[in-house]
Amino acid sequence: MVLSIRKRIYFFKKDLQFEGGETAGTGSHWKINKRELRDVLASVIDKKQTETMNKIICIGLGYIGFPTAAMLAGKGLTVVGVDINERVVESVNKGETHIVEPGLSEVVEQVVRSGHLRATMRPEEGDVYLIVVPTPFRGNHEPDISYVETAIRSVIPLLKKGSLLIIESTSPVGTTDKMKQLVYAERPELEGAIYMAYCPERVLPGNLLYELEYNDRVIGGIDEASTQKAMEFYTLFVKGNLHKTNAKTAEMCKLTENSSRDVQIAFANELSLICDKAGINVWELIELANKHPRVNILQPGCGVGGHCIAVDPYFLTSEFPVESQLIAKSRELNNYKAFWCAEKIKNTMLEYEMKRSRKPVVAIMGLAFKPNIDDLRESPAKYITQKVMQSEPENLLIVEPNIHEHPIFKLTDYQAAYERADIVVFLVAHKEFKTLAWNEQKVILDFCGIFKK
C-alpha cells in the first residue's frame, strides 16, 4: 500500500501545481488544491482497505445491526446480515424493513436490489465480523452476555488469519477480553493472528443513518494492532472523529455515557415530582432555570426506557455496587416515576368517576420508549399502560401511531381517541400528538410536555 501511494505522489509532483502559488513541478498543465489531493490520496487508501475488508458479516439485524448493515452495503461493501428470526431474514431478502427508521426503507430496497446486502440465519466466512446483538439483564439486574457469547461461538469456526472481529453490543467491562479468551481456547492457533476490538454504537433512534456516519466513535482493541485495524474499518464509512483507546475503556465509555444521561434525567424527573406537589409548572421552571449560563436541566418524562439508558447503568451497579450509589439511586427514581404516573392516572380516573358518577373514557397516548419510533423495549409508557389496564381494563383507548398492531393492546387512531376521551394522558411526545389543540373540556395529564401546561 505504501509503495502505491508513493507512486501516486510522484506523478502528482511531476504534473500538478497547487493553487496559492505552491508549485509541485514545472511545466504543469492543470491545477489541484491541497484538499483535492488529500481526498484523492484518501480514496487510494480507502480502496486498498476495502480490498481487504470487502465482505462484512453482521451478526444481529435489530434496531442497530440492521441499519448498520444497510449503511455498509450502501458504501459498496458486500454485507451478509445474520439473524435467528426467520421472518426478519425473509423480509430483508425481499428488500423490506422490519423497524421504523426515517430513510432506512429506501436504503434497504436499493442495497438488496444491487446485491450488496442479503440475510441468512447462519454466519458465513467473511473479512470483518460485527457483533450487534442485544445484551439484556436478568431478573436481578445482572447483565446477560449470553447472546454475545453465542454470536462469538458461531463465528469461531470461520475465523482465519487476518480476520477482524468487532463487538458493538453494549457490554460489561471486561467482556471483550473474555471473548478473546473464548476464541483462543477453541482456536489456539489464532492467538496473535486475528484482530479483536470493541466499538460501541452511540446513536439516537430516529436519526440513526445520519449518526452512524457522522458521530464520533471510540475504538478499543485487545492490542494496538487490533485497535489500528478496527480504525481502518470504521474509516470506510464514519465521517466523525475516531478515538483510540483500549477495549476496557471503550466498554466503560458506553456505560458512562448512558449512566450520565440516566442521572441527569433522574434530576429532571425528581423536579417534576416536587413541582407537582408544590403546584408549580415544571416546564416553565426548567426553561427559566436554564437561562443560567451554567445550568442545562433536561426535560422530565414518564420514566426512562429503551435498551440503552434504562439498561446500561445496571451493568455498573451489578459489578460495582458500593461505588455506584448515585447511579443506582437514579435508576430507582426513574423507575419510580413510571409507577407514580400510573398511580396519578388511576387516581384521576377515580376522581372523575366520583364527580361525574360515571367511568371516564381514557386515551393513553403513546407506547414507545421515545418519540417517533416503534421501539417498545423497556418502555415506561408500556409499563404505565399495563398498570392502568390491570385496574381499569374498560374504557381505555390506547394509541401508538408508529405500530399497526400489538398482541396485548388494541390500538386506536390518535385523532379519534382524542375526540372521544374524557381524560387524555400524554406519555410520549410523538409528532402526531403535537398537531392536537388544547381542549379545556378534557382532563389532560401531560407527562411529556406536549402542551407544557
Image (tube, grey):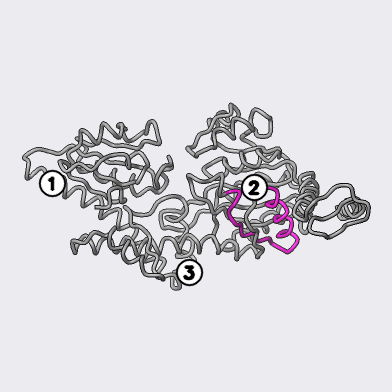
Q: Which residue is mark 3?
A: 320
Q: Residue at left 44%, top 56%?
A: 309
* Position in image of residue 294 (x %, y %): 41, 71
Is residue 347 shown above or below 192? above
At label 2, counting other C-alpha atoms closer than 10 Å, the crowd grade (few under 14, some 14-19, many 20 or more) is many
Which numbered marker is on residue 130?
2
- Badge 1 marks a residue whose secondary structure is helix
Q: Is residue 13 left or right of residue 19?
A: right
Q: Which residue is mark 1?
A: 350
Distance Cα–Cα, label 2 vs label 3: 28 Å
Camera-nearest label, 1 or 3: 1
Q: Which residues are magenta?
A: 212-237
Q: How many marks?
A: 3
Q: Amino acid at mark 2?
A: Leu
Quarter where residue 402 is shown: top left
* Position in image of residue 133 (x %, y %): 56, 47
Query: Is residue 350 something that shows in the picture?
Result: yes
